């Protein structure tokens, strides 16, 4: 066999060898376990986060205000915490927006006046309705009724009624839905379009309200009869008179007309986050106080952590590793197999700080201030909990 032939044969055999090795690895027997471990300790560091904001009609004025407020807050924190504090800024934002005038009507309730000798008000309510066999005149009838003093449309629609037009008004055109028999044994039905109008008025007494209401119903009825002519019928419906409480009437919300819209103009808003990291946990309360007085608009949160977390990290990973090994041994013994070498190993560890959010802190501060004699006694309204590390270890063992 010459050299060229041997080289080609060797190259042809390599993919087969790699395939056999991959198949051998895939056929290995393994078990996967995950262990968990925690460690904790008293916090010896805290980070305070504040928001400083500015609002102005021009970009230059807005950035100037934000810069000035930030400097005042930083100087106040440095003076209170000393050189041991690490103060940083982040999350700066600067946004223009359009500001509009308020053109929305504002409901204004009329205040009740002192009781007077004015007699109670009485209200008359009634209905006037008209019936016609066609819908064509309904709009004209509504217009005439409203013009005559009707307040609104009441119950209206189409209905089937017994033929009751034995002597219809002269000139009225009727449309029979069923023809009458020669003997008159079968009743006849008519399709009628009905428009009802509501009438309301008030008076200083029941009699006064009744007289005004009857006169108004007559006026509306006369207008409807004049419009419908001989092609329909006008009737009076139910009516009533009720006494009203004048003090309740005075409390009815009334609306002012909307003010004229103001011209829109561009405004600017800027925000920045100022953080202060310090080991002086005892200065939590005074630090928040000086920062808010210097111009911070909000305390975002207070984070308690460890200055050196190496010991906590080591302890949590060791506990997680021991937990994973114990689980693997228990699983192998229960399945009647033996653990061999570790094929894969990974870990994930992270700090577990204790965070107090701004609204929680302010609520605790108000509660503490309410039960102590001096503000200094309420300087630490929250007690930081233990912080530390949490670790997970993932292990793949070969078994036999």
Image (cartoon, helix red, strand yellow):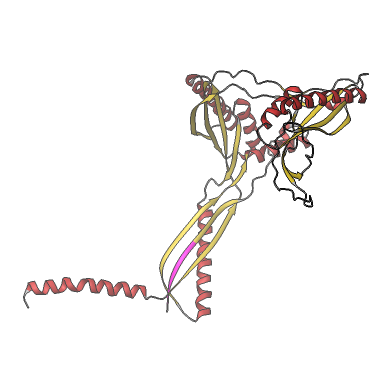
Q: Residue furthest left?
A: 2
**Quadrant in which the N terminus appears:** bottom left
Q: Residue furthest front?
A: 182
Taking the spot 16% from the left edge, 70% from the top edge, the residue there is 11
**Quadrant in which the C terminus appears:** bottom left
- Is 395 contained in the magenta span? yes
Taking the spot 53% from the left edge, 30% from the top edge, the residue there is 271
Point out residue 120 in the picture as x, y percentages from the top left corner.
Answer: 91, 24
Taking the spot 12% from the left edge, 72% from the top edge, the residue there is 8
Point out residue 112 in the picture as x, y percentages from the top left corner.
Answer: 84, 23
Q: Quadrant of residue 255?
A: top right
Q: Is residue 322 above or below residue 367?
A: below
Q: Is residue 215 above or below residue 50?
A: above
- Is 327 contained in the magenta span? no
- The stretch of residues the image draws in magenta is 393-399
**Magenta segment main secondary structure:** strand
């Amino acid at each position: 066999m010459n050299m060229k032939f041997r080289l080609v044969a060797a190259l042809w055999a390599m993919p087969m060898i790699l395939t056999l090795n991959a198949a051998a690895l895939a056929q290995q027997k393994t078990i996967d376990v995950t262990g968990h471990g925690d460690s904790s300790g008293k916090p010896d560091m805290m980070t305070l986060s504040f928001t400083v904001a500015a609002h102005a009609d021009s970009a230059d004025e807005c950035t100037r205000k934000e810069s000035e407020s930030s400097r005042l807050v930083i100087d106040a924190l440095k003076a209170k915490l000393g050189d041991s504090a690490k103060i940083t800024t982040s999350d700066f934002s600067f946004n223009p927006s359009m500001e509009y005038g308020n053109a929305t009507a504002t409901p204004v309730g009329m205040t009740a006046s002192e009781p007077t000798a004015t007699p109670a008000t009485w209200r008359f309510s009634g209905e006037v309705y008209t019936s016609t066999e066609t819908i064509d005149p309904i709009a004209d009838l509504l217009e005439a009724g409203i013009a005559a003093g009707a307040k609104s449309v009441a119950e209206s629609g189409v209905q089937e009624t017994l033929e009751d037009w034995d002597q219809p008004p002269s000139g009225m055109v009727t449309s029979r839905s069923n023809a009458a028999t020669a003997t008159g044994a079968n009743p006849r039905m008519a399709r009628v379009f009905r428009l009802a109008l509501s009438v309301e008025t008030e008076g200083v007494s029941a009699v006064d309200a009744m007289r005004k209401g009857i006169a108004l119903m007559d006026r509306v009825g006369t207008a409807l009869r004049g419009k419908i002519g001989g092609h329909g019928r006008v009737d009076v419906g139910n009516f009533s008179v009720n006494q009203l409480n004048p003090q309740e009437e005075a409390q009815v919300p009334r609306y002012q007309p909307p003010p004229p819209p103001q011209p829109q103009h561009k405004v600017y808003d800027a925000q920045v986050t100022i953080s202060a990291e310090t080991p002086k946990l005892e200065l939590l309360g005074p630090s928040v106080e000086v920062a808010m007085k210097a111009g911070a608009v909000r305390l975002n949160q207070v984070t308690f952590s460890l200055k050196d977390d190496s010991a906590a990290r080591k302890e949590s990973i060791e506990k997680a590793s021991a937990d994973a090994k114990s689980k693997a041994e228990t699983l192998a013994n229960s399945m009647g197999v033996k653990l061999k070498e570790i094929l894969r190993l990974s870990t994930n560890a992270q700090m577990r700080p204790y965070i107090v959010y701004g609204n929680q802190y302010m609520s605790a501060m108000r509660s503490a201030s309410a039960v102590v004699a001096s503000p200094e006694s309420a300087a630490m309204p929250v007690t930081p909990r233990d912080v530390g590390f949490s670790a997970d270890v993932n292990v793949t063992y070969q078994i036999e």
